[in-house]
Image (cartoon, rainbow, N blue to C red):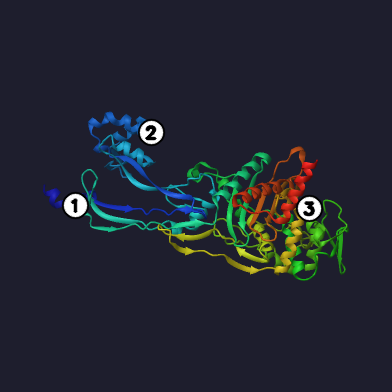
Amino acid sequence: MVQLQVSDAEKYKKIALGVRENFITTPARRGDVVDRKGNLLATTRSVVEVGLDPHSIDEEDLEKLPDAARILKIPLTELQDAVSRKTRSTESGELRFVRWVKLKDEVDEKTYRNLQALNIDGIYGNYKHSRLYPNHSLGSHVLGYVNKEGKACMGVEMFADYYLKGQDGWRESERDGRRREMPQYRSFEVLARDGLNVELSIDRIIQGIAEDELKRVGDEFDPLSASILVTNPISGEILAMANYPDFDPNKYNESELEHQRNRILTDLYEPGSTFKIVPVAGAMNEGLVKPEDIIDCSDSSYRVGTRVRRLPSDHHPLGKISLKEVVQKSSNRGAARLGIKLGAQRLYEYSKAFGFGEPTRLGLTGERGGMLHQPKNWDGLTITRLPIGHAVAVTALQVHQSMSVIANGGVLLKPKLLRRIFDHEGKTVVPFGSQLRRRVIGENVAEEISSMLATVVSREGTARQAQIPGFDVAGKTGTTQKIIDGRYSNQHHVASFVGYFPEKNPRILITVVVDEPKMKAGRLGYGGSVAGPAFKRVGTRIVGYLGLKPQPQQVSMIQSENSKIRSF
């Protein structure tokens, strides 16, 4: 008694207090993520972590264990083993009582109530929050996920974590011999502050349209990957951002890490002909050429003073054609001549102005700035190869942004994904507006280039398969040979198309990128034949969804075509 009450009194006092003290953290509920119309994209649900105290299991409750195992959907042997695990040895060899053995994580509340109905002393649960993505893989690369440790990983979950996570609360109290809290002895309490909600510019329906098309592209061409980006070019709002393959953020640990990469932001490629709007826009903005000017695309070289520049070849001989036809036919030699007219420094500056060589600063993790060398590091071929989209590495988002400059009158906007932060009453806490980055070219120049790009999506252009009935479409195809083992490959290509409609008053801008489409009979996977039809299908479905009215002149053309069919 003297040893307990005098010699070791302080030791046993601490043990007793340690058993009685109860410090409980009350986790904050993470805010929801919704699309532009309030549809739920990510939410938080209450779940229960179920476990048992082996010392609190009564003998008469042992016969109830098979029912408990059935409700929890775990092997009975696992439950019986947990009941018998009453002590454990520490690293120092000391024997300690086991007061908690976890049986199952993230049990839903209905299952837990069924378990409680068995009235087994010693089996109980702790409530906690679990992240849920109700649409499964829809928008997975945009949303990202929260892992089992509660850490936000990639996507909006990480980007907006400051607003979403909230602030945990805590309380101090005492507990009885069965580890139950005694509220009457609660000494201190700080309430949790739940996280705020995030509204995205994403439209769930348009996101679904894009992802449906990617599955179709995957089935038809079996590419390494494919991406579709849809925005409103006037506001910069992202309506859909989709990649193939994708993953289910509810089961992130079951998917390959490669599939979790947002390729629109991370994957670099040579843009090819989609880059040609840069030298065309630069030369026109500097007053060096006009749409009706004739450019000689027949010569394989171009003399500048005493220096002769070797020009890239075209797919077909084009001869002397107008600047408008250079754009329509996607002439490599025509674009290279414009690059030479601009000169290295101005070509570089316009490339930077269009957004190449730097990240868009969208805010999502993993975005890369691409590669655009300064003129001092160019070799003798760069001045003729950069204008056709070689010697530069870009992301799909950068290509998309460059085309938006033409669509919205020569202005570069920062892409916008977050619309607002709002509380649980729906009140806006932080609004996010469109951000102007800079004016790139004059408005008149942008309008002239837009008219030329409309001829690309015509019967005479390279993207006739991208036409959307009832609408003038402006856009540009791209077919790029990939560099394999240090050389351009004839077998590995990136097919792309970026375009917008209606041409005169753009509402929708779409970029489609397909990496290494596998074609039948050894045909080449051109942007016009692979990405163009995908653009058309996505655009047509968006027209129906948004209820866009066809342009009057296009309606008359459709009626004329229908009358020809009927008369035939």
Q: Which residue is denoted by mark 2 in the rendering?
A: 74
Position in image of residue 414 (x %, y %): 59, 63
> Which residue is at the front of the view, 27 or 404?
404
Amino acid under disc 2: Ile
Q: CA distance from mark 2 to mark 1?
A: 40 Å
Q: Quadrant of residue 86?
A: top left
At mark 2, the secondary structure is loop
Secondary structure under the numbered disc 3 in the rendered image: loop
Which of labels 2 and 3 is toward the front?
3
The amino acid type found where label 3 is placed reads Gly
Report x, y in % for residue 401: 64, 60
**What crowding class fits label 2: few (fewer than 14 Cα within 10 Å), some (14-19), or many (20 or more)?**
some
Q: How many marks?
A: 3
Task: State the residue position of label 1.
Answer: 13
Q: Position of residue 340 (x, y in %)?
A: 80, 65
| Label of residue 461 in the image | 3
Decide if residue 137 is on the left or right side of residue 279.
left
- Disc 1 crowd, CA 10 A, few/some/many (<14, 14-19, 20+): few
Residue 373 appears anywhere in the view: yes
Q: Is residue 463 visible?
A: no
Q: Which mark is residue 255?
A: none
Q: Name the N-terminal-most of marks 2 and 1.
A: 1
At label 3, counting other C-alpha atoms closer than 10 Å, the crowd grade (few under 14, some 14-19, many 20 or more) is many
Is 532 situated left or right of 133 in this image?
right
